[in-house]
Amino acid sequence: MQSQNGGALAEYAVAKEGSTVPRPPELAGLKLDGTGPQVNVLVTAASGGVGQYAVQLAKLANAHVTATCGARNMDLVRSLGADEVLDYKTPDGVALRSPSGRKYDVIIHCAHNIPWSTFEANLTSKGKVVNTTPGICTVMSAAAKTIKCSKKQLIPLFTSPNKAEVAWAKSIDGHATGKILVE
């Protein structure tokens, strides 16, 4: 299924070369060839479609990866390369506390409804949060951080899905494991 704007939901897709781009050499400051310094990364909702990719890309960057997911998906997320896995319903999972006590250099946030104060308590002094599910509160928090000249950053990542509404609705409800098949 292809949208008019070039997106697709498919196991495999054929695309013209001019419609593709190479994987970037880095993402959120992480060098994906593993040559950068080891950093600590947290991926929230790591068993979802975006979270699964984020865990694997962070491991390519030689990061120490902590991930959150539901209890039923913990083994899956470990198999993707996560070094530490938290059940998001436990007290440590709710607080995003690394079992090894690490602070995070980068948080790839793929979940909903986690307040900035929870992130801020777990970030290094120059840590950043890349929010893949931003809402108006995210934008306001990012603006406030910029105005305060904080070295900690909140970076909203916006996408605009406009096809396959049922599939997007299932994804947005927050409990899909991996990608959703659209027939």
Image (cartoon, rainbow, N blue to C red):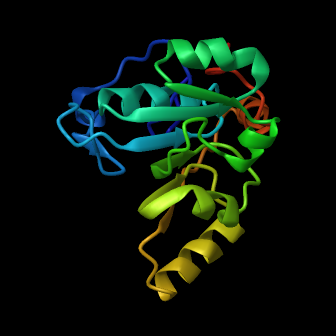
Whether residue 157 appears in this view of the structure is no
Residue 160 x, y percent position in the rendering: 58, 50
Residue 81 x, y percent position in the rendering: 46, 19
- Foreground: 4 or 23? 23
Residue 7 x, y percent position in the rendering: 48, 34
Q: Quadrant of residue 19?
A: top left
Q: Quadrant of the N terminus?
A: top right
**125 w.r.t. 160: above or below:** below
**88 w.r.t. 178: above or below:** below
- Foreground: 39 or 99? 99
Residue depicted at x 59% and y 64%: 120
Q: Quadrant of residue 178?
A: top right
Residue depicted at x 36% and y 35%: 63
How many labels sit on residues? 0
Residue depicted at x 56% and y 44%: 101
Q: Quadrant of the C terminus?
A: top right
Q: Residue furthest front?
A: 101
